[in-house]
Structures are given as C-alpha cells and as structure tokens.
Amino acid sequence: MEMYLPIKHVHMLTAYITAFLFILRLVLDALGKTGWRQTPLRWLPHVNDTILLLMAVSLIALANLPVFGLPWLVIKIVLLFGYIIAGVFAMNLKRPKQVRVIAAVLALAQLLFIFHLAVAKPMLW
Ligand code: HEM
C-alpha cells in the first residue's frame, strides 16, 4: 500500500502528458504540420497512455477499489472510451475538416471532464 502514492503520481504525470501530447498534435494538424506522423510523436502517446492505464489498474488493485460503487470512476472509464473514439476521428486526415474539428472539441471536453471527475470525485449515486 505504500506504493499507492508514488503510483498515483505517475498516473497523474502521465495524465498531464496525455493532455499535452493530444493538444500538441491537434495544434500541429491545425497549422498544417501533419508530418508529426513520421516522428516519435506517432508512438510516444501510445507508450504514455499504456503507462497511464497500467497505473490506473494498479491503483484499483492496490486499494481494492469498488469500481462500480464509485460513480466518478465508472463515468471516468466511460468517458475514456468516448475520448479515444473522438480522438481517433479528430486525428484522421481522411475525415472532412468539419468532422475533425467537432471530434477534437468533443475529445477535449471529455478529457476535461475526466480531469474534473478525477479531482472532485463526486458521489452521484
Ligand atoms: C485520460 C484518462 C485519465 C486521466 C486524464 C486521469 C487523471 C487522473 C488524475 C489527474 C488523478 C489525480 C486526482 C487527484 O488529484 O486526486 C487521477 C486519479 C486516479 N485515477 Fe485517473 N485518469 C485517467 C484514467 C483513469 C482510468 C481509466 C482509471 C481506472 C480504470 C483511473 C483511475 C484512477 C484512480 C483509482 C485514481 C486515484 C484516486 C485517488 O486515490 O485519489 N484513471 N486520475
């Protein structure tokens, strides 16, 4: 259990890196600099997100958290799927620009909500 806090801090650090790398790629695409797909920026977010999720699962296992008894956690996981789907659309250059912009806004809104739930941990039911 003494590992809980260090793991939570790695989870938090990777969460902030996730947001930074997502926004960075959106900005680069918006500036027409789509070449990041041929740089480490293509795979770096996946490595970071894998660590983020591994740390999340470790936290749940370590603290024996009742996932379905914690509304903020359930909604966080649902929003994570929504964020991933919207993110895939936002990054897909084959999609029309309008679709990508709407998807980017939806992805960012969900990411923001995930951060809010993580910090506020509201008990909704
Ligand atoms: C993009 C996805 C995610 C982001 C941005 C994120 C962000 C965060 C942040 C910022 C915290 C620290 C909150 C605080 O200040 O106390 C946190 C804590 C936590 N997150 Fe996540 N998280 C994400 C995904 C997940 C997922 C998918 C799970 C579960 C499967 C999860 C489980 C947890 C747990 C158990 C804690 C610790 C709560 C505590 O002890 O205070 N997170 N998350």
Image: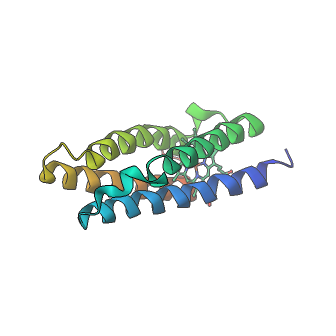
Residue at the image position 48 percent from the left and 44 percent from the top: 76
- In the image, taking residue 76 as reference, residue 105 lies left or right, namely left
Which residue lies at the image location 60% right of the left edge and 46% below the top edge?
A: 52
Q: Which x, y percent locates residue 97? A: 14, 53
Occupied quadrant, residue 78: top left
Does residue 125 appear in the picture of this structure?
no
Task: Determine the residue positioned at 65% across, 36% down.
Answer: 57
Q: Between 38 and 111, which is closer to the camera in this rendering?
A: 38
Q: With respect to residue 15, does 76 lie above or below? A: above
- The residue located at (40%, 64%) in the rendering is 24
Note whether 58 is above or below 108 in the view shown: above
Q: Residue furthest right?
A: 2
In the image, taking residue 91 as reference, residue 48 lies left or right, namely right
Image coordinates of residue 34 in percent, x first then y, are 29, 57
The location of residue 92, given as percent across then percent down, is 26, 44
Instruction: State the residue in front, 75 or 24.
Output: 24
Front residue (pair 98, 125): 98
Measured as percent of width and height from the top left, residue 44 is found at 52, 50
2 or 55: nearer the viewer: 55
Check the picture and name the quadrant holding the N terminus: top right
